[in-house]
Image: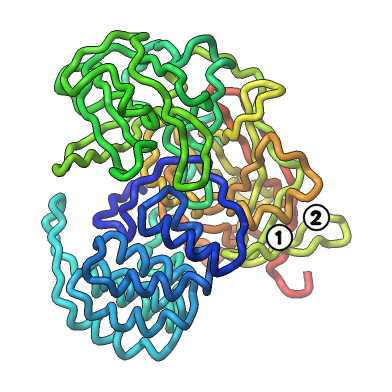
Amino acid sequence: MRRSTALALSTWPVLICLVAFADTPGKDRAARALRQFRAGKPNAYQEVISAGEAAVDGLAKILGDKKADGTLRFTAANALGDIGSRKAVGPLLRALKDPYFNVRRCAALALGKIGDKSARRALVKLAREDPFAWRDPKTGKVRHLVREEARKALDILAGRATPETAGLRKEKETFLKDAAKPPASPVKVRMRRLGWPFKGGFRDQKVWNNYQQPTDQYVHAALDFIQPAGAEVLAVEGGYVAAIATNYPKSKTHHFFIVTPKKSGDEGWCYTHVDPASYTFKVGDKVRKGQALGKLVKFYVGKNRGADHLHLHYVRFKKTGAGKVDVHSLVDPLLFFDWKDSAPPAIDKQFHFVREGTLDEFPAGPDGLARVSGMVDVIVGISDNAHKDHACTWMVPVVTLEIAGDEAKPWRKLVLDQRGPVENPRAASVLYVSNKDKQRWLKGRPRFPVVHFVKATNTDGDGIIEPADRMQTWDTAQRDQKGRRRFPDGLYRVTVRAWDLKGNLGSRTVSVRVRNLRGK
């Protein structure tokens, strides 16, 4: 179900940048990643994680630097937890006494992830005594956020939870009566037909990443148009320039501005990666549809070149002071434009039936069908594009799952519906298998179209990707209120359906055997 998350552990904004880092030797790579990390560069977090042990000392130094930016310091604690080195235990224990509550929060959870039992005493003390209290403005409820993270860490140390499920509460499940058609669209934004941001038609735009494109860290909540630096960006709709801002003041690559259809509105088009020196407007100016707004910036991040591109999305925004603007994507931008999509989604012939929370596949029986029991995750490969030779890195917005057996009531869920808002971009790993892990199923296959592997059973059925969806699975041993098996042993048909934004349907059904009873 929909949940709001306040004061997130990492508040760095996300803008996809298509940056490629060279693979350099350990210390050199770590040093470069740390420089990028300190500068707040895109993709730097993942780079310091990839550097591993070699980055620990540098991250520990950032964590302990009281003069450094607070966000940088608590993000360093997050990174130390993700690396998981015991070398970080000492610095993290010292950080539990830091005056900044977010540093204490992140240090506590990082200690839980590392799993060193020597941290238990300090975490128990933190869970009981930390003074920080925060009142939720929506509910009025007071929460002790640092204590909560300390308790999560203790649950991980005790084996009562994993780093992914610590502190989560399983949500009520929603089931579909019919999984053969998508539910009504959740889009609440008024649609109107607009012009493209670059000259020409759909194919000339060179759309690469689309609205629901997943990466290892987040779901991409905009369209990326791959165009050369200096290309003129045209206003897709007339309106008023409501805001000009940047999340990276030291780099001109990430400036953005927002044009609202209505004067003084809080919804409109957000354009990112336009050279601020080329802006043809100022805040408050009226612009017309098709007007040249500026030119794409030459895209460099440090010494690493990224692809020149426009990042465009339709957002609701809020000015937060000090020149900062928070944005929240409301709808897939493609719904506003005219384009053709004749290629239905493709679903892999092979489904992967794995033990919950792992990638360990259940073995096949003599009939060649997987034999499953207990907690089962169903992983399915899905790809999509707009036309036969389209190399864009797309994904589908709507996915449903149906599990049916001759002696069982059909189990139907809405896995994904991202035609409307992307509620929690950071929750991508809940639903999608990481790029590294999915390689086992991609050997010998062409690079394009890109296949995304979906953990279809990781959903409470509302179509929204949320952290608590990690706790969902197919429990083949489930019993009803009368103690009868919900899924009696036997043959089951598992059907996954996927729709693209034009409504083209891809469908695949795979058979599987449930064998919960010993000796059968």
| Residue type marked 2 | Leu
Q: Residue at x 48, y 49 (%)?
A: 428
Whether tag 1 and tag 2 are in contact, CB under 8 A, the answer is: no
For label 2, count other residues whose C-alpha is less than 10 Å away and answer few (under 14), some (14-19) or many (20+). some
| Amino acid type, mark 1 | Val
The one nearer the camera, 235 or 498, is 235
Instruction: Identify the residue at image location x=61%, y=52%.
Output: 435
Front of the two marks 1 and 2: 2
Q: Is residue 463 above or below residue 369?
A: above
- Would residue 284 be found to the left or right of residue 148 on screen? left
Q: Position of residue 211 (x, y in %)?
A: 47, 33
Determine whether the residue tagged by mark 1 lies in a helix, strand or loop.
strand
Up the image or down, 186 lies above or below 363; here it is: above
Please report whichever mark, 1 or 2, sits nearer to the chain's N-terminal start.
2
Of residues 98 and 380, which is closer to you in this image? 98
Q: Are there few (<14), some (14-19), or many (20+) residues within 10 Å of tag 1? A: many
Q: Residue furthest right?
A: 366
Residue at image x 48%, y 29%? 309
Q: Is residue 443 visible?
A: yes
Q: Is residue 297 above or below residue 42?
A: above
Q: Tell me the tag on residue 170.
A: none
**What's the CA distance linking mark 1 and mark 2?**
10 Å
Marker disc for residue 514: 1
Q: Quadrant of residue 368?
A: bottom right
Q: Position of residue 137 (x, y in %)?
A: 13, 52
For the residue labelled by badge 2, is the local secondary structure a helix, a strand or a loop?
loop
The figure's colour scheme reads: rainbow
Q: Which residue is mark 2?
A: 369
**Is residue 183 shown left or right of residue 254?**
right
Q: Quadrant of the C terminus?
A: bottom right
